Image: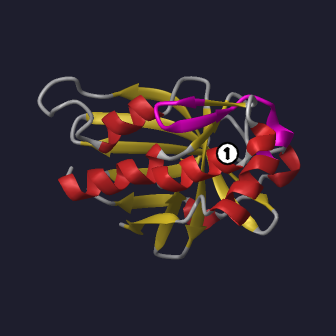
Amino acid sequence: MKPLLLLFFTLLLSGCLSSNDPFYTESSIVTDDRLIGTFEKDGIWSIKKHPSIPKHYSILLRERKEWIELDGTLFTIDSETYLDLKKEKENPSTAGDPAGSSQVQFLSKLLKNDTHTVLGISIEDDSITLKGSDIHALRAFRDSFRPHQGRMIVNEEHLTITTGTEESRMIVSEAQQQHGLFHKPITFKRK
């Protein structure tokens, strides 16, 4: 991966919100066929309907011989669309590149097993744009959002919400509307 892209990808996802519970409810799930396809940004992102979970997507990132497979769920809160990501399988390389120098290695470290991570998303006919948060916005959110202290765990510069789906959704809405989270974009072009 190009060093500048890895740095940008790291900044996009390092300031993220995670939860042990999904960020979506069944009634908030949406689907968009424009998400299905192959997208490129130094690695190949293949997205298809999940083979066994209705209204979910199977997202496969391949970079050289490495790969990671994610379960993705589109959902809305208010008028914003988000992507809930959960790691399913992986095969990151430990040889060759320095640790963490590929998108696959970075995602493998960031996305913990059985944990959901949320990103904003915009979908166009020819591209998808993921919207994350920089670490400064995340810290400002954490420091100013006093009512929820004790319900979030700060770990490796990201926040894990520990209070269940409904409160997680309220925290995501507040983070987006008042604290500038989900505003750092990275666009992947349709191949």
Q: Amino acid at mark 1?
A: His
Identify the residue shown where x is 50% and y is 51%: 47
57 over 174 or under it: above or below: above
Position in image of residue 5 (x %, y %): 27, 57
76 over 107 or under it: above or below: below
Identify the residue shown where x is 57% and y is 69%: 123
Asked whether 160 or 126 is in front, the reply is 160
Position in image of residue 111 (x %, y %): 49, 33
Q: Quadrant of residue 159?
A: top right
Secondary structure under the numbered disc 1 in the rendered image: loop
Question: In the displayed image of the protein, which residue is found farthest to the left?
Answer: 96
Identify the residue shown where x is 83% and y is 41%: 167
Position in image of residue 102 (x %, y %): 26, 41
Question: Quick check: can you spot residue 136?
Answer: yes
Asked whether 14 or 66 is in front, the reply is 14
Residue that numbered label 1 is attached to: 56
Image: magenta residue range: 154-169
Does the stretch in magenta take in 47?
no
